[in-house]
């Protein structure tokens, strides 16, 4: 079982595992407004089998640390409102910036910009009840968007 601490003046640490519905099915859902669900189908199948854990330490106004253990492994520390940080996903380079959410939710928004392929990804992570919600929007140079949402259980 992972360690969990509640919010305090020093921030909070959340260790989470991929949430599953009570019947064992995937909690993923594609929230695109089009019929192109095939593109994300293999991504979700891989994510379902990955038993992904996100270790998050968020010190509001200062830092956001993210360690992902699963199909894709990564560890990164961001300064909230700081300079862009170079990251890589499957050989694609991004420049990431992090901001606090300003809509009353506890969480952050990571903007991942890929200049070479001319698209960017907005990743919003926030607390909702006893889950961490991760909303992802890929925005292509032609303005088209692909959206997905994943939920993680807090442990």
Image (tube, helix red, strand yellow):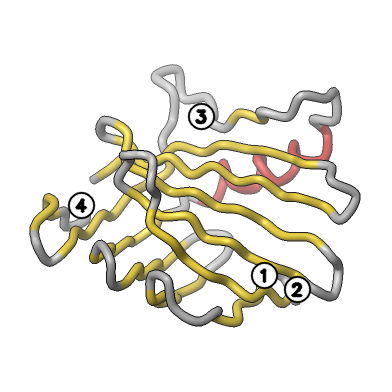
Residue 37, placed above or below residue 52: above
**Disc nearer the start of the sequence (1/3):** 3
**Disc nearer the start of the sequence (4/2):** 4
Label 4 – label 2 distance at C-alpha = 33 Å
Residue 33 position in % (x across, y down): 76, 24
Give the labeled residue for mark 4: 1
Local SS, label 2: strand
**Disc nearer the start of the sequence (3/2):** 3
Contact check, label 4 and label 3, Cβ < 8 Å: no
Residue under the image location 66 percent in, 40 percent down: 45
Contact check, label 3 and label 2, Cβ < 8 Å: no
Foreground mark, 1 or 4, reads: 1
Label 4 – label 3 distance at C-alpha = 21 Å
Contact check, label 1 and label 2, Cβ < 8 Å: yes
Foreground mark, 1 or 3, reads: 1
Q: Residues within 10 Å of mark 3 (few under 14, many from 20)?
A: some
Q: For residue 76, what is the image quadrant?
A: bottom left
Residue 57 position in % (x across, y down): 27, 64
Local SS, label 4: loop
Give the labeled residue for mark 2: 92
Give the labeled residue for mark 3: 27
Residue nearest the viewer, comparing 83 with 12: 83
Q: Which mark is residue 66?
A: none
Residue under the image location 26 percent in, 34 percent down: 130
Label 1 – label 2 distance at C-alpha = 5 Å
Residue 79, placed above or below residue 28: below
Q: Dividing the image into 4 quarters, which one contains the C terminus?
A: top left
Residue under the image location 52 percent in, 38 percent down: 150
Give the labeled residue for mark 1: 89
Residue 102 position in % (x across, y down): 38, 47
């Amino acid at each position: 079982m992972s360690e969990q601490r509640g919010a305090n003046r020093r921030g909070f640490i959340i260790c989470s595992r991929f949430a599953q519905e009570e019947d064992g099915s995937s909690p993923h859902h594609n929230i695109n407004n089009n019929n192109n669900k095939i593109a994300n189908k293999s991504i979700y199948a891989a994510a379902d089998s990955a038993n992904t854990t996100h270790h998050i330490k968020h010190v509001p106004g200062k830092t956001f640390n993210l360690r992902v253990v699963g199909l894709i492994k990564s560890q990164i520390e961001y300064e909230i409102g700081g300079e862009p940080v170079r990251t890589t996903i499957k050989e694609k380079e991004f420049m990431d910036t992090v901001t606090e959410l300003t809509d009353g939710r506890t969480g952050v928004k990571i903007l991942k910009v890929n200049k070479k392929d001319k698209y960017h990804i907005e990743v919003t992570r926030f607390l909702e009840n006893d889950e961490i919600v991760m909303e992802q929007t890929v925005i292509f140079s032609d303005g088209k968007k692909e959206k997905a949402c994943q939920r993680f259980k807090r442990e």
